[in-house]
Amino acid sequence: MNIVVLVKSAVDEAELRADPSGHPVLKGAAVKMSNFDMNGVEEAVKQKEANGGTVIVVTLGGADAKKAIKEAMAMGGTRAVHILAEPPAAPDSLATAYCLAQAVKRIGDVDLVVCSEGASDTYQGEVGAMVAEFLDMPFIAYARKVATANGKVRCEQGLRGAVRVLEAKLPAVVSVVSEANVPRYPTLLQVMAAGKKPIEEIPVASLNGPDYPETGTEVIDITIQPADRKKLLFDGTPEEAAKKLVDALKQEAVL
Amino acid sequence: MKLFGAEQERVLGSLYGAEAAEAYGSLLRSLSVVLEEKVSPLSLALDQGKGEIKVPRRVLFDQGVCRLPHAGEFGGMGVSFGVYALAMELAGAADASTAMSFGIHNTVAEAVATFGSAEQKGRLLSALLSGKKLAAFALTEPTSGSDARSMHTTASRDGKNYVIDGSKMFITNAGEADLYLVFAATGKGHGAFLVEGTNPGLKVGRALKEKLGMRGSHTAEVRLVKCLVAEDSLLGKEGTGFDQAKRLLDSSRIVMGMICIGIARAAYVKALAYAKGRELFGRKLSDMQITREKVANAAIETSAARLLCMHAARLKDVGKPYSSEAAQGKVFAAEMAVRTCDAAVQLLGGYGYTSDDVHRHLRDARLLTIGEGTSEVLRMLIASQELERER
Amino acid sequence: MTGAVLSYSESAELAGEVAAAGAEVATMLGTDAVALELDEMSAGLRTSGSVVVLKGDRALEAIADSAASGILEFAKTKGFGALLIGETRFGTMVAAKVAARLKVGSLGKGKKLRVDGGRLVLERDAYGGKFVATVASKLPCVAVVQAGAYRATDAPPRAVETVTVAVGEPKVAIAETRHGQERDAGIKSAAKIVSAGRGFAKKEDLALAQDLASALGAAIGCSRPLSSDLGWMGEEAHIGLTGAYVHPQLYVAIGISGQLQHVAGIKDSKIIVAINKDRQAPIFQVADYGIVGDLYEIVPALTKAVKQG
């Protein structure tokens, strides 16, 4: 089974700082594999272990995306395709999805495309569905359980309190939620071996065909959210602290 | 606490060059994520006598840290000792007791890999590297620590076997270990013997529970009473035991030094976080000059300790003599760790004194100016090498 | 003239909110607002604009594929300036599919829409909610509207029209449906919320949070681990980047460390209170008031103090 897993090299939002004007310092910002993508990679590797085959990691990003790619490889990826595009990698979800889909088409013979419910830094959760559209494949989202058999994929999907079991013919695109699995920690041996697995680099410009979606979408501005919180701590015994808190809340007229 | 951070990356870069540093960096970064998530959270409880050290220790084995400096034949990874040493700094920061227990086990693995016969390596090394068998290093005795050569434990020939009699003290992993490396005086000097934990002649005494620190690890007296071992349990040639011990301790001292650095970092990260939040006299504690001096000193000393220990590691990696450097590194790192952890308690004030999550680092560090070579005996070693050198 | 502003949500509650957003944007654009309902009209839909019920030869709201196809058919024939969809998992899928099929911009999900120079502009969370991004797209385009961002009007629709659309067979089939109870924790509209995190050792201990909530007259929510990994509370109680965004007057976070993913969902709270045993927990950086200590001692003390007034 040839499985593609879409991985995003996301900005490590915990480390991201703002400059004096409140804009994020993106240049040189720490990056990491998007948290939820670990579940995507785990799912892809599980499918490979169950059905045999290969796991091809596909990432759209700059040179620093290699770190996330290697992490995915250490978890069990067979090889990787790195679509090289310096940030901002793509203006919007649609353009991102287009590039990823083009890369998947180039890989050819793909049975399953796995992605996650959203990227940890931007969390819009649209790329998976859009990739499926560009590939003209069925799309099952928010899967908690994924099973493949007889040319079909069968997933359990959680949607507003109900659980549905959905089925589609392969090849298909599936996005998993973090409840789907527990991502494995690679051993040091696996991390070392990952360094030797092949990564194919494709410049993003080479993927853009006449059907590239020019949507005229742009990010006009990114500014830090103001967070002027008082950060007052009350100490003393639990009773004393509780009393002080209740008094403060009454002052705030929220009690 | 992020165990593998910018300072470790820079050290890797300056010691190994960019390309190797990137590869090693991936290893250590991956390890640090596992340590942060699976070992650090257990650390306080271990100090408080809750939980079992075998759980976090298993994490280190499963990750394959033990394999790093060994050749590939029995499951080693053939990565430099220096990278292993840095990994042990991370382990020390995650949990000191676990790092100590694991480090000592690795010394026995190194003993088998370096001095063992093909048969011994075939029989034991794979299990030691995977952690299937846990080892203990039994050199120190109730009446001989620094003066190890004067040990009273004897091993006398009995046909094709040896009978070991004596007593070893302050043995880490005692009671848990499957294999003990026991040093004994034979007729012709000393020998190092591989004794199975199940040997009826090996008796583990009362667990030493009143330790100041390193409370997660199991420490006890081990008595050898007419302990019968086969000929093939002797490591290397009879008479070379003491030299073997010296060489193994040289290596282990680098690791102990790195563990000290980890402990020191764990303590002052907490102190720094506190200083940034604590307000007094209208300012933050971290803004005060007197605090900044302490922060600078901690940074200077940690860097110095790390580079000294890594220097010894690099010398070892290229096959050069490193025993003085290893001793220097360990002396400095251990004393630095005690100073830094003490400074951390001071900075945290009342909270430092009353919180075992803070003072345990000082208590853990306090062992290492004593264990694996007291600062006094190591200074003797360093001085005698200095005096011997042609100047 | 620009095409109409279409709004849609499969959730009756959200549909009213999105319709209000649609009405506002339509006014800015000087065009009509049309609320879309699929398969049938939901009782009590509130919108000041007109409603179009789309019907096909198969259920449109069963599968995101069909819903997208149905809306697409209508949008193509009628023409549209903007399509606003209410934020649910289902809605997110539909928005993505429509945008991809039409190759129009998708602004993603946010809480504030405006029109500027003929473009639709959306403010949305970025980088775990630490920052806010302003995104713009030329028309026509798609946007997803967060729950609670707009308030539904209290007026019945002006006109209701039914339109038939032809959709093909969806690529995904429903093999089985296990209806859970569609529960509502009431957190999206609550004025006070008490929220529980990993600091609680076991499910039974949540009773402490319940007691406090009762004393305060608050709803109960939780951070993601409690609803997903541990299953102690339902998904409907999960507050955070991938769950619900809340905006109460008072938010009390108990035993919650304050990871960005959670904090993203509580930013609009008027007052945030944190109770955690770890002084270094990030939650204290985003709280107005905090108590460092054992929640098992502090929460009962707080409940008592609240009751004593």
Image (spheres, rainbow, N blue to C red):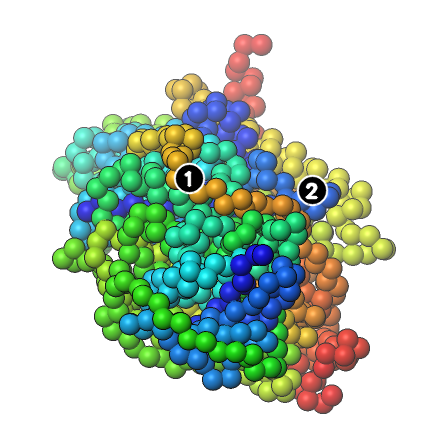
Circle 1 — which element?
A: loop
The image quarter in which residue C304 lies: bottom right
Q: Amino acid at mark 1?
A: Tyr
- Check chain identity for marks 1 and 2: say if they share one: yes
Residue at the spot 16% in from the left edge and 55% down from the top edge: A151
Q: Residue placed farthest to the right in the image?
A: B281
The chain holding disc 2 is A
Q: Looking at the image, which residue is at 38% across and 61% down?
A: C73
In this rendering, would C1 be left or right of B248? right
Which residue is labeled 2 in the image? A19
Q: Is residue B66 visible?
A: no
* 1 or 2: tag closer to the N-terminus: 2
Classify mark 2: residues with Cα within 10 Å, few (<14), some (14-19) or many (20+).
few
Furthest residue to the bottom? C308
Q: Viewed as shown, does residue C211 lie left or right of A8?
A: right
For residue A153, say whether it is visible.
yes
Q: Residue at x 59, y 46 (%)?
A: A219
Q: Chain of mark 1?
A: A
State the residue position of label 1. Answer: A212
Q: CA distance from mark 1 to mark 2?
A: 34 Å
Secondary element under disc 2, as helix, strand or loop, is loop
- In percent of width and height, residue B333 lies at 57, 36
Nearer the viewer's eye, disc 1 or disc 2? 1
From this view, report whether residue B21 is shown above or below residue C257.
above
Question: x%, y% of residue B241?
Answer: 32, 31
| Screen quadrant of the C terminus of chain B | top right
Which class describes the residues within 10 Å of circle 1: few (<14), some (14-19), or many (20+)? some
> In the displayed structure, would residue B285 be above or below residue B328?
below
Residue at 28% in and 75% down: C177
Q: Nearer the viewer, residue A1 or A133?
A: A133
